[in-house]
């Protein structure tokens, strides 16, 4: 059985997908881009600004699922330009603490709305 996760504290799904789905003891969070939930506007700042917004959005989705970034076991980081990796990584390190989640980071040809970064995550659900 799977359960959809929804929150107004993160950008709304704008297609046939969920912000996250809980299934099999895990939370599968859709990729987040740097949209500001309160305004729907795109954060067009630096890679650091965009990464911070993405991780705040991801955190809000996980919170709605009853978890937090500390419960994340795997992330995938999609970058418009791999030259931004070290700057993204510095901000990423502000949000994630040891033991760090497993991670893949890839450069892609294009991201939604031409943003610089998108991050998706898989987290454990918390035992009740």
Image (cartoon, helix red, strand yellow):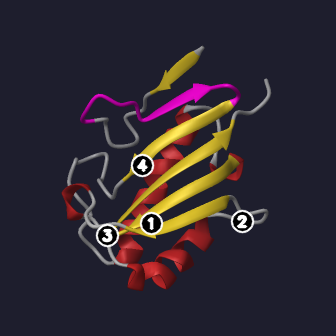
Decide whether residue 16 is among the magenta residues: yes
Circle 3/circle 4 CB separation < 8 Å: no
Q: Which is in the foreground here, disc 3 or disc 2?
A: 3
N-terminal of the two: label 3 or label 2?
2
Checking the image for residue 62, the label placed there is none
> Secondary structure under badge 1?
helix
Q: Position of residue 3 (x, y in %)?
A: 54, 19
Could you tell me how many numbered marks the image carries? 4
Task: Give me the disc on residue 31.
Answer: 4
Residue 57: say if magenta: no
**What secondary structure do most residues of the magenta stretch adopt?**
loop
User: Which residue bears the numbered disc 1?
Assistant: 52
Foreground pick, 61 / 110: 110
Q: Nearer the viewer, mark 4 or mark 1?
A: 4
The image quadrant where one finds the C terminus is top right
Would you place residue 26 above or below residue 2 in this image?
Answer: below
Residue 15 location in percent, x, y? 25, 33
Number of the label disc, if any, that sits on residue 97: 2
In-image side of 102 versus 22 (left or right) = right
Question: What residue is disc 3 on?
Answer: 116
Q: CA distance from mark 3 to mark 4?
A: 13 Å
Q: Quadrant of residue 54?
A: bottom left
In the depicted structure, whether residue 68 falls above or below residue 91: above
Q: What is the magenta range?
A: 14-25
Query: Which numbered disc, 2 or 1, marks the residue that appears first in the sequence?
Result: 1
Q: Secondary structure at mark 3?
A: loop
Distance (Cα) linking label 4 and label 2: 20 Å
Mark earlier in primary sequence (3, 4) = 4
Helix, strand or loop under label 2: loop
């Amino acid at each position: 059985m799977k359960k959809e996760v929804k929150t107004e504290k993160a950008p709304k799904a704008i297609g046939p997908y969920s912000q996250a789905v809980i299934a099999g003891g895990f939370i599968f969070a859709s990729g987040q881009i740097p949209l500001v939930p309160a305004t729907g506007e795109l954060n067009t700042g630096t890679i650091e600004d965009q990464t911070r917004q993405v991780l705040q959005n991801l955190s809000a989705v996980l919170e709605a699922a009853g978890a937090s970034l500390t419960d994340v076991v795997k992330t995938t980081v999609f970058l418009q330009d791999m030259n931004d990796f070290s700057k993204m990584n510095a901000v990423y390190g502000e949000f994630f603490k040891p033991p760090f989640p497993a991670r893949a980071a890839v450069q892609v040809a294009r991201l939604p709305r031409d943003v610089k970064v998108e991050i998706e995550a898989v987290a454990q659900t918390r035992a009740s």
